[in-house]
Amino acid sequence: MAKQAPSPALATDQDLEQLTSLFKLLSDKTRLQILTLLAQGERNVTSLCEELNLPQPTVSHHLGLLRMTNVVGHRRDGKQVIYGLAGRGTSGKDHVLELPVHHLVVRILPKPKA
């Protein structure tokens, strides 16, 4: 009888809660649009509002949720707040968001240029 390879460790309840929370966060169309724009490079709120055609309070609300979960980071440039992806990995102007959870990695990449 052949030996079976050991199965990978099962996800803990904490891993599954973290993954569930991440997928809930990413299940919103506006937040996904923000992330795809930030995958192309950093932006301020005004720029995001113009590109999304949404009011500033709506964009700021979604950015706040993304910041609280460390998906989006920010920095100050004078009076401006500049937002960008908080994940690992950058290459030039394009940014990659990697969110490792248990044995999975969720990646958000810029759209390939044609």
Image (cartoon, grey):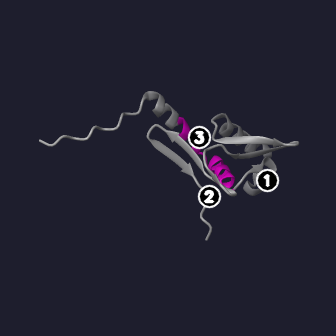
Residue 108: horizontal and vertical position, in percent?
58, 51
* Displayed quadrant of residue 60: top right
Identity, as a three-letter code, of the amino acid under mark 3? Leu
Helix, strand or loop at mark 1: helix
Judged left or right of residue 78, residue 37 is: left
Magenta-tinted stretch: 21-40
* Quadrant occupied by the C terminus: bottom right
Q: Which residue is mark 3?
A: 25
Say which label, 2 or 3, has the lower sequence index: 3
Q: Residue at x 68, y 54 (%)?
A: 37
Disc 2 to disc 3, C-alpha distance: 19 Å
The answer to whether 76 is drawn above or below residue 92 in the figure is: above
* Quarter in which the N terminus is drawn: top left
| Earlier residue among tags 3 and 1 | 3
- Amino acid carrying label 2: it is Pro
Q: Secondary structure at mark 3?
A: helix
Residue at 59% x, 40% y is 25
Kindly give the residue lying farthest to the right in the view shown: 79
Task: Classify 40 as above or below 31.
Answer: below
Q: Residue 38: within the magenta?
A: yes
Look at the image and tell me whether residue 4 can be seen. yes
Question: Where is residue 103 shown, x and y percent of the image?
Answer: 43, 40
In the rendered image, residue 7, in percent from the top left (x then y), is placed at 30, 38
| Disc marking residue 110 | 2
Q: CA distance from mark 2 to mark 1?
A: 17 Å
Q: Is residue 81 magenta?
A: no
**Regarding mark 2 in the picture, which secondary structure is present there?**
loop
Per the rendering, the mark at residue 47 is 1
